[in-house]
Image: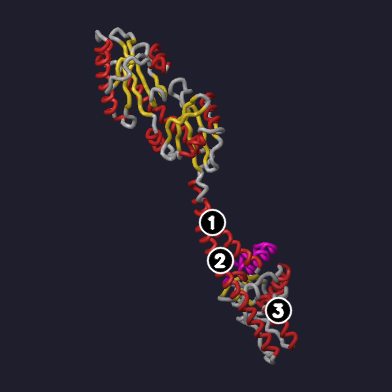
Amino acid sequence: MRGKIIAVFAVIVLMVGGLFYALTRASLAEIGRPGEAPRALAAAMAQLQVDGLVLERWLDSHASDPKLREPFNAGTAPARAEAATSAANAIREAVAASPELARTPPSLVVLVDTKGVVLGRNASALMRGDNLGAVYPSLKLAIEQGVTGSDVWVSRARNEQLLASYAPIRSDAGQIIGAVAVGTALNDERLTNASERTSGRVLVVATQSGDGLDVVAKSRDASPQLVAALTASPAKDGALKALSSGQTVDIGGLAGEYSAVGHALDGYGDGRRAVLLSIAQLRTPGLASALLWPLLGVAALGLVLVVIAGYFLDAYISQPVSEIEDGLLAIMNGRTDLRFQIEHAELGGLVFRLNSLLNQLLGVQEDETDAEGRPSRAPTSASFRDALEVDERMAALSVEEIPADAKALLEEPEDAYYARIFAEYIAAKKSLGDPVDHITRDAFVARLKASEQELGRKHGKPMRYKIEVRGKEIVLLAVPLA
């Protein structure tokens, strides 16, 4: 009984616990994991690098256009400036119409000479004569080496906040005569777009400003409080370390629900121009309220299951106990012939012993037979003999009438014959559902030999038996051997 009680309530506990675990796990699915911020950083970094590389390849393929050489061949400075502006406008329109560059529309297109001095820019006469090569040395270096490149153009003094890509322009003779540069906005919209295309996590781009950190752009979910925390120690120190070391650095000093990492923005300039930060928010503040109703629902279900199980267990135990109590009270009041007729897996043994005790105390002979009249006590080793019914119909047959299988019985060794007969008899008893534990081989063989001798004397010829099952009885068929 104890096992059943334990099993019932163990099943209930497992069901409630398993359901609670499943609901808890589902509710916690939105919580950021420790590796989420580094994965978001790597994805955003790769996206920005791909944007720059695609723009570089596009510029390199269009830098050989003869129209881009015309500004460098003009006779006067004003003519070169006007031609450069026209060429820059054409480049901007071509970039905007290019499907692979549709997500990063150009904000600035400039043509520069071999020293990085601006000949002209798109849609404006501004910047003519500006020495961008001095402001952004990587541009001048790329022109000298005749290669494409990208850089972070951020200057508060010049009001520039761009990711720029450039490609050299060559003359008909193959000499480098200048370069074309295209700058795309590095702003909140750009980072929000990069976040949505990758991990959906908060992204921030910052540059070093003296000993401090200047936040250049941030994605949509970056709150002012978060930005303020990034520009203060120790978060600022971690970001500057990432910028100077070129390694991924964990950013500390943020609120408990945030985890952040930073890495220098590779693929732009010397790789130390800006730092990219990825921030994952651990959504723990609403966790308690999110789990409240699932917890209450599971607890209510557990109570319902316990009440139902308790009801059935009470009925399973209390009803037979109540019947025994009422029966004993009736016997005490004079109904000495009353006996308990309770079939119960756990209390059946107790009921049987109570009935036996009542019979002994009241001097009543117990009925030791089952519902079919068979004795309920196990038979002794000799009680099986009464079941040895012998069929003598073949015993009086003549020699000519003896069946063919009599020769097989005659030729069978004695030990093998008795072993086989015993085995066949036991098998037949089992097939009828009769008990066989009380039958021993020695007792059976001794009784069989005595029966064969008695039958042999009666008919004047040796006899052996064959086992036959007829209905519910086992018959020994006497077979004469001569």
In this rendering, the answer to whether 124 lies above or below 425 is above
Q: Which mark is residue 353?
A: 3
Real-space Cα distance between discs 1 and 2? 14 Å
Q: Residue 463: say if magenta.
A: no
In primary-sequence order, the first of circles 1 and 3 is: 1
Mark 3 belongs to which amino acid? Arg
Which residue occupies the foreground of this view, 329 or 415? 329
Coordinates of residue 180 in the picture (x, y in percent): 32, 18
In this rendering, the answer to whether 282 lies above or below 318 is above
Residue on which the image places disc 1: 20
Mark 1 belongs to which amino acid? Phe
Coordinates of residue 335 in the picture (x, y in percent): 67, 91
In this rendering, would 481 be left or right of 164? right
Q: Are marks 3 and 2 in contact (CB under 8 Å)?
A: no
Give me the residue at 34% from left, 10% from top.
176
The secondary element bearing badge 3 is classed as helix
Q: Quadrant of the N terminus?
A: bottom right
In this rendering, would 19 be left or right of 73? right
Residue 428: quarter of image:
bottom right
Q: Which mark is residue 303?
A: 2
The residues colored magenta run 400-427
For the question of whether residue 385 can be seen, the reply is: no
